[in-house]
Structure formats: C-alpha cells, structure tokens
Amino acid sequence: MPAPYIADVDPDCGVAVVYSYFLVGSFGPQIDRSLFWTLDLATGEKRPLEPEDMGDGSSDIPARVVAASYSPDGEEVVAWVSMPSGEYDLAVIDPLTEVAMDLALPVQQEPIPPVQPQWAANDTVMLPGATGSYLLTLERIDD
C-alpha cells in the first residue's frame, strides 16, 4: 500500500480505515485495485474495503470506495463510492462482509472525489454536498 493514510480509527474494535494517498490521487478507471482497506491495529492485517453488489454489472469498471469513516459503534462504514457512470453514491458498508447498502442519494456530482462523510451518532451522518451540507438520519430496517 503506497503512502498509507488513516481515514478513521475505531479504537474500541482496534480497526482503522486506511487508504493509499498515491492511488486515490491518481484514481481513474485504469486503477484495478482497492483504494481503501480496513486495517487490524493489533495484527497489521488489511482487507480491501469494496462495496459488494453496487453498480449495474454491465461495466468492466468496478465501484470503488473513495472516502469512508466508521460509525461510532464500529458496526458500519459510511462511504462515498465512485460508480462506473462517473457519479458518486453514498453507501453504508459492513466492513466484515463488504455488503453495501446504496443510499440512493447521489448528491455529489462533481468530477472530483467527495469529502469524507462524518458520523454524528450511530444513526446520523453529516456530509458536504455539491449544493450544500446534509444531515442524514439513518434507520436500520431488519428483514
């Protein structure tokens, strides 16, 4: 992982979200590897943070996490995901299974990667958007 930076740390779980400054800075369709990882602070083991089942499947370009942070309880990661269409979607990702829930809120349509979203509480996310700031309240729905 060239030039690793820490995006966020969950001290209770001993895990961090890290990214490669160089890879994010040169991000484009030609990048064929993860940009963000979860890092176990005790063992140093890293796992790619990739959103499962996002995108339409018709593109060879995968959806990639371009900004992420842990929820206060460490259960989820909120992330901006670069979609094959060139837009950015906000998603909540389970960092263990990589199952992603696309929030279908494409508020960031600028050609530059969006700013990292921040959790205000386990169910509230603050984020800047192209037209202003947003405060989202998330409700967990169990099937």
Image (cartoon, rainbow, N blue to C red):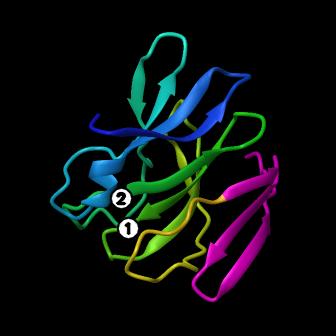
Residue at mark 1? 83
Magenta run includes residue 61 = no
Q: Which mark is residue 2?
A: none
Who is closer to the viewer here, 142 or 44? Answer: 44
The quadrant the N terminus occupies is: top left
At numbered mark 1, what does the secondary structure look like: helix, strand or loop?
A: loop
Residue at mark 2? 63
Would you identify the image quadrant in which residue 135 lies? bottom right
Residue name at image x 73 percent, y 46 percent = 143
Residue name at image x 41 percent, y 45 percent = 50
At numbered mark 2, what does the secondary structure look like: helix, strand or loop?
A: loop
Left or right, 139 with respect to 87, comes to: right
Left or right, 97 with respect to 77, comes to: left
- What predominant SS class does the magenta segment belong to? strand
Left or right, 77 with respect to 6, comes to: right
Please state the horizontal and vertical placement of residue 22, each as a whole percent of the image: 28, 50
Residue name at image x 54 percent, y 30 percent = 96
Magenta run includes residue 131 = yes
Please state the horizontal and vertical placement of residue 120, each as a whole percent of the image: 82, 54
Who is closer to the viewer here, 5 or 131? Answer: 5
Q: 124 above or below 142? A: below
Please state the horizontal and vertical placement of residue 102, each as a whole percent of the image: 56, 61
Q: Are the residues at dot 1 and dot 2 in contact (C-beta closer than 8 Å)?
A: yes
Q: 90 above or below 5? A: below
What is the spatial separation of the Cα atoms under label 1 and label 2, in whole angstroms?
5 Å
- Mark 1: give few (<14), some (14-19) or many (20+) Cα within 10 Å: some
Kind of residue at badge 2? Ala
In the picture as drawn, the residue positioned furthest to the top comes out as 43
Would you identify the image quadrant in which residue 56 lies? bottom left
The part of the chain drawn in magenta is 118-143
Residue name at image x 56 percent, y 31 percent = 16
